[in-house]
Image: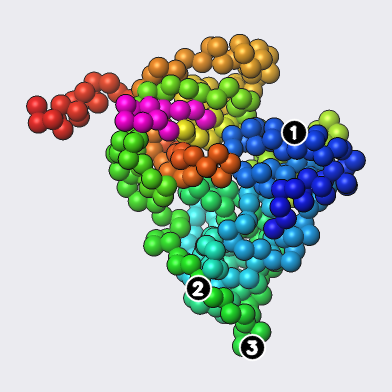
Amino acid sequence: MLSAEELVREISGKSGKGKEEVKRLIEEKQVELSGLVSEEGAAYIVGRELGVELIRDTRRGLKIKNILPDMRSVNITAKVVSSFEPREFDRNGKKGVVASLILGDDTGTIRLPLWNDEVKLISSLGIDQDDILEVSGAWAKPDKRSDGVELRLGKRGEIKKIEGADAPDMGAVQSAPPSDPKAPAGPAQLMEIGRLKPGMNVQVKGCLVQVYKRKPYFEVCPQCGSRAEEKEGGFVCKDHGAVEPTYNLLLSGVIDDGTGNIRFVLFRDQAEKMLGKSADDVKREFDKEGPESFWAKFGGLGKDFTIEGRVKTNDFSNETEILANSVAETDVKEESKRLLKSLGK
């Protein structure tokens, strides 16, 4: 994978912008995304927004640990460490089928869900556990049930099974996750913040002591949910062209329970719960009032919240944080009863 300095140099050379300006744009993109992407990941996004496609590195093949959200034309060679049976679903009256492969190399594992007609690839290629696959032309997106990413084939993605003498030595391939990736990550344990470690699925209760006062919404494609890019006065999805975007929320802050504090990140409906407004209302108010007035009206500071999610290490700050999948204002009476019961009273 290209280093941050190499990416800056390439973006600068192809876009005509100075290196210092490119670095500033990358820093601003990391701030906008609340540190959820590395410097290199932010550089890929900035490059794409400036019309510079930085796909040379992804075409020659990546290690799984280096795959970042929103990467396009991703090529990997990996072993099938788990394969999950197809399952049918009904979403808003539309029926479909999905199956998942967990692919691994010596740096990690990644989920590759196959949707509808893509599921036929498993039988047509005879894909089974321990097979070596070459995945090309895929794209990466955040995995909603973990702190990582997942791959999607999309329109341009392909899978090739590598057999016999052509199969590479995969070395020490990482183990698969212990459960079906469509299943819950496991029960969240109520824990003190001071005891949290990356990888835990936890529930914490504490006081909201800080909220990061950044733009809380971003534009997405209404068809696939991918981030929409502003271009020539409108918005464009890489897969669906010009679109009228919808909006998703991203909110981050700090919660403290007396044993310590930790940063949390909320997306979509969970951010709506803490803000007490829909994404459309948030956008309208934020654009009309401006950041200072919008955040001055936020009434969550000082309130107690219960947050569930996975503990992870932020790639940018190297600090521990919770990627939340559930948030609710704590019922003080019920919490008092719980504490008294835990004290044997």
Report if the CB atoms under discs 2 and 1 are less than 8 Å apart: no
Q: Can residue 123 be seen at all in this image of the molecule?
A: no
Q: Which residue is mark 1?
A: 24
The amino acid type, in three-letter code, at marker 3 is: Ala
The disc at residue 165 is: 3
The amino acid type, in three-letter code, at marker 1 is: Arg
Label 3, secondary structure: give it.
Answer: helix
Identify which residue is drawn at 54% across, 29% down: 251
Which of pointers 2 and 1 lies earlier in the amino acid sequence?
1
Examine the residues drawn in magenta and state their main secondary structure. strand
Of all residues, the one furthest to the bottom in this rendering is: 165
Q: Which residue is mark 2?
A: 172
Label 2, secondary structure: give it.
Answer: loop
Q: Is residue 147 above or below residue 56?
A: above
Q: Position of residue 338 (x, y in %)?
A: 20, 29
Tell me where the magenta segment starts and ends, as one range: 252-262
Q: Is residue 333 above or below residue 120?
A: above
